[in-house]
Image (cartoon, rainbow, N blue to C red):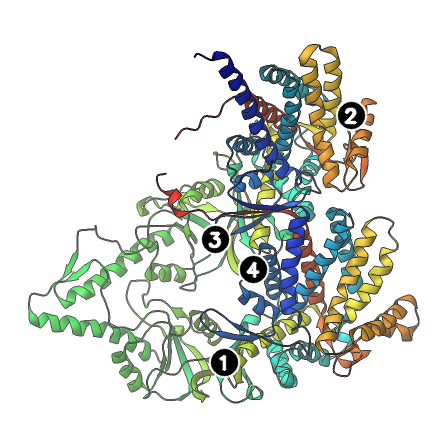
Amino acid sequence: MSVSILGSRESGQNIRDTNVRAVQAVANIVKSSLGPNGLDKMLVDEIGDVVISNDGATILRSLEVQHPAAKVLVELSRLQDQEVGDGTTSVVIVAAELLKRANDLVKYKIHPTTIIAGYRLAMKESIQYIKDYLSVKTETLGKDAILNVAKTSLNSKLIGAESDHFANMIVNCVEAVGIVGPNKDVKYPIKSIKVLKCIGLSAKESVHLNGFALMTGRTAQGMPTSIKNARIACLDFNLNKFKLQMGIQVLVNDAKNLEKIRIRELEITKERIQKVLKAGANVVLVTKAIDDFALKYFVEAGAIAVRRVDKKDIRKIAKQCGAEVLITLMNNEGEEVFNESSLGSAEEVTEERLGDNDFIFIKGMKKSSSQTLILRGANEFMLDETERSVHDAICVVKRVLESKSVVVGGGAVETALSIYLDSFARTLGSKEQLAISEFAESLLVIPKTLAINAAQDACDLLAKMKMYHAASQSSSEEKKQEYKYVGLDLANGKVRNNLKAGVLEPTISKIKSLKFATEAAISILRIDDLIELAPKPEKERDGH
Amino acid sequence: MKAANPEKGLANEKQKSIRMTNISAAKAVADTVRTSLGPRGMDKMIKDSKGEVMITNDGATIMKQMEVLHPTAKMLVELSKAQDIEAGDGTTSVVVIAGALLNSCTALLEKGIHPSQISDSFKIAGDHASKILEEMSVKLDLSDTTSLEKIASTSLASKVVSQHSQELAPIAVRAVMSIVSEGDENVDLKNIKVSKKLGGTVDDTELIDGLVFASNHASHAAGGPTRVENPKIALIQFCLSSPKTDMENNIIVQDYTGMDRILREERKYIVNLCKKIVDTGCNVLLIQKSVLRDAMNDLSLHYLAKHRVMVVRDIEREDVDFISRTLGITPIAHVDQFTSNKLGSAKLVEEETVGEGKIVRIKGCSNNSPQGKTASILVRGSNQLVLDEADRSLHDALCVIRSLVKKRALVPGGGAPEMEMSQKLLELSRTLTGAESICVRSFSEALEIVPYTLAENAGLNPINIVTELRNRHTNGDKHAGINVRRGGVSNMMEENVVQPLLVSLSALNLATECVRMILKIDDVVMVR
């Protein structure tokens, strides 16, 4: 007799099969988007919004999968996106392949726990092997290496054709935001890079700007478009007509008083503005609203006022130009004053028109650590995808700059690991051996998919690669050692030394994706029971 | 009552079938969780009625989530809950043992033994078994941290987060030990605050020296400080905003000068409040969440920021007690009581960015308040599923240490105590006669379910393992158990696989009691 519960239950081999099928289905969706020749997906949601993307995490996030095991995979690619920022497709493909092969082993009566132990061991060995033999220090490769890393990441994307242009921009950008930490290690906070999108022109016209840009115009046409030697005030309160708080009533007995109260309401705001302007401010950034009547004071004073600036942006600007973000004008005695010390300065603040939008540029601030990338593109979909690709590339460059270590791309690492694990498995005499060989075999799914997506002969190329890697691992000859960098050349359907060809990826991305994929596969493999409770009928709640 | 005889016969028939239905319903529950027993146990994925997914290995959690329908099945769920409260660990094994005992009852009932007799004999067997357990236990000194850590890692070994047992076990031990003083018979786990924060990995979980606010962060609105060394901390329960009039009352402004006056008065009021606070030397202000009105307004934030006072707002009411105990301060309910002797001190208050959010950390609190000591743990995890499971596992580990404080003795793990009890009870059954002997014998056989299941879940051959264990125990090797790592039988004490006596003891007693209760039920009456 089975337990009677409100809902359905599936256990044992059944649930394992269902889980593997669900996971396989998810992986099959993203499979064709892997690699430089991968194709894009067009996703149309229920409202009719269209997303065109090549990014695994984005595709999976938009899918809204139902199956709980498949959700684990979606979560996995999200995690990879968060921690590394790139390799979101490959991590899903590897995890699905690992699971498929594990399920086959279970059918041969190998207990899941044995497979899990084998997979863990294989993962540890591979990570060690990558660290010891396959990674290359960037110092030995020069600046080109970092450009190449960015290019490798961009090549698989929509903007792959302009990868040179973007790679240059991104590397310059990331290098400029570097901060030397207390232990002399350099950190690259990617938050300091602001990416703005602007429709119009071609992707090639995207520009990199040293400074800060706001995607809004000045509030009134009468304000100047450019101010040299700007004095910036950052206000975090609104400059609307003054309103009394809730719970305070205005009771007017005399009609004359009514007008006076109205005037007073305007004057309170006017006084505030004048205090700010009197202190010498000629650029006023406000996070909230500015009433139209208030604009004339700015126009008269020849100052630029910008309303509805993002709070995060205003804080960054304040930090860099030395201003203070004020939420009220109160001083220690309860009076309203504006001190000159609250002002920041910049060499130039200008408004420029790009495409259909006005931008405010703040250039030459005291401490300029932030960078702005303005992306151009023919349409919105392309811009969105460009932004995602640039984000991926920025993350990758940051990883390489921080960890200073790269591995060779194009399926080289996976093939090398596969050969190594295969021979490692043979040194073990237990059932784990089988699990490790399957792990080795699973890794080959990456070069295989890469070749298939590029319409090349996968078997032929794989065989050649395996030959080179086996040769490099079995002999100590110097020339053959070079063979460990052999990867796919997808454009020509050949194999080549990818270290020389400049196909590089950050080591940390490879290691993390291997770790995450194995962990995800294990956590799904450990499940032997799925209990799905029926949704509660609403009425039952009543009466309690 | 004409046809008394046939009806009585019918009644007997009915009682029997009810007993059997009860037993099989309860057994079905036990079978569900059986596969998650032990270090190589499998996980369950549960999708609840709201559609949220949970992956867990914890018996109590699985049972709680499952929402079984049958009343006796519910008793088993309650059983694992009771074990969770009593010992905090062994929630799966208690259900598995109960299931095995019920299974043996079926055979005994079919032999025609009266249920009360079975129940009484089980009581004898249970009592005897507890004695055996106590005899085989090893005394433990609470100062022996290494042993404690080993026990905590045994408990963690079966969880999803098992690969992090190296990090979590010492944390659990240190947390409990820091709030226990010599001679304590019990530990209030409420004094250990476990906060969860998404991001990072489980490795980053840490025991906090002091306090941590995982869901509050310092107020940034006015650009106040986010790091204060040698802080003077105050916890206030009043608001720093302009006072609100009562519901029905209104302030009436008749003249435009009144507007200015209101503005000025408001500013003055706030400045006065803040001045009083700043004058006492306070530089870190914790403010309790307020429902009625804003706890802070822009004016007070601005003033405090100007005077370099760090502000942490929205402290939950239930946390106030814990915080004041940790910092050794009393919460201040009105500004008039705000005096410098109410301030607490620490080494450092700092806001940190972790993952996507922020936390505030108070380091080096002067933990000398008379009400007792506290500890805080910050659990990290890469996604919500892992985070929740890590939290549950850590709770289990904390409970395990607590049960050691309650009863300072250890028994070996890996099925050794169950095998030993089974062997000793078998000997006992030979000294008895009648139905009692048969029942005790069945009881002893039922206990073998634990080693059997452990072996099965580890992918080993259960028959080989159980027979070898039997052999070893008969030859007096009472610490022999299943070594899951190596896939054989070995001495558990040497392998450092140990668990608290209280966990095994309470599992045994609770399971026996529950089974006896189920046996005694002979009718189910549905009342509408």
Q: Are marks 1 and 2 in contact (CB under 8 Å)?
A: no
Q: Alpha carbon of mark 4 to alpha carbon of mark 1: how far? A: 30 Å
Earlier sequence position, callout 4 versus callout 2: 4
- Residue B190, percent from left and from top: 50, 38
Q: Alpha carbon of mark 3 to alpha carbon of mark 1: how far? A: 37 Å
- Residue A509, percent from left and from top: 68, 67
Disc 3 designates what residue?
B215
A115 sits left or right of A303 in the view? right
Disc 2 designates what residue?
B478
Question: Looking at the figure, which quarter contains the C terminus of chain B?
Answer: top left
Label 3: few (<14), some (14–19) or many (≥20) C-alpha neighbours in 10 Å? some
Which kind of residue does numbered mark 2 sit on? Lys
Q: Alpha carbon of mark 4 to alpha carbon of mark 2: how far? A: 49 Å
Q: Nearer the viewer, residue A413 or B47?
A: B47
In which chain is the residue bearing label 3? B
Label 1: few (<14), some (14–19) or many (≥20) C-alpha neighbours in 10 Å? some
Which kind of residue does numbered mark 4 sit on? Gly
Q: Are marks 4 and 1 in contact (CB under 8 Å)?
A: no
Helix, strand or loop at mark 1? helix
* Circle 3 or circle 1, nearest the eye: 1
Res B278 seen here: yes
